[in-house]
Image (cartoon, rainbow, N blue to C red):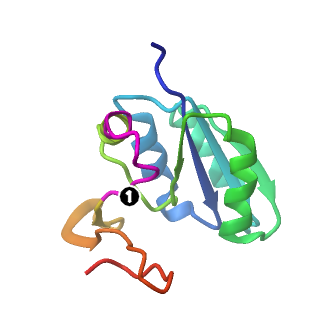
Amino acid sequence: MSSPSIAAITVTYNSQRFFRKYMESLRDQERPLDRVVLVDSGSADPQYLDQAFSCGVRAEVVRKGNVGICVGNNIGWQAVRDHDYILFLNPDAFLSPEFIRDAVAYMEANPKVGMLMPTLLGYSIEGDEPTGLIDTTGVVRSWYGGLPERD
């Protein structure tokens, strides 16, 4: 049995502040991603995206005007929709080294699960350290179709 293919899509907009740490977290995955697509949504100075290559991550950069996150994710999805798993990831989210490995293992062991969201832990970019706080444990679907944060 072959290993499932995994892609990540990130929509960026003036994300210089977080970008190096973000790219390092992708580079340091125990289970590397097969494809990374960065959709720049009209950053004022998109040269920071070149850090992807200096961090050792093979990434495709798609430069667009300010299309926003939803359209940007759809642009990225068009490029990677043939992959088994697709990660939609914000540029200020830093993955632990085992995240991709563990997420794929969980999905493979639970074929009725269609998507998952990890607990998001706080991180101080200024101090370059975790805050020790939980940002969110995800969203839930309400009876009326809304997607509020889980308490």
Quarter of the image holding residue 129? bottom left
Quadrant in which the N terminus appears: top left
Which image quadrant for residue 45? Answer: bottom right
Residue 139 appears left or right of 52: left
Describe residue 30's horizontal placement relative to residue 53 as left or right: left
- Which of the pair 129/33 is nearer the observer? 33
Q: Is residue 55 above or below residue 64?
A: above
Q: Which residue is drawn at 63% across and 37% down?
A: 59
- The extreme top residue here reads 1
Q: Which residue occupies the foreground of this view, 131 or 127?
A: 131
- What is the chief secondary structure element of the magenta stretch? loop
Q: What stretch is highlighted in magenta?
A: 106-118
Crowd rating for badge 1 (residues with CA inside 10 Å; few <14, some 14–19, many 20+): few
Residue 110 lies in the magenta stretch: yes
Residue 43 visible at all: no
Q: Is residue 25 left or right of residue 133?
A: right
Question: Horizontal and vertical percent for residue 54?
Answer: 56, 36
Give the residue at mark 1. 117
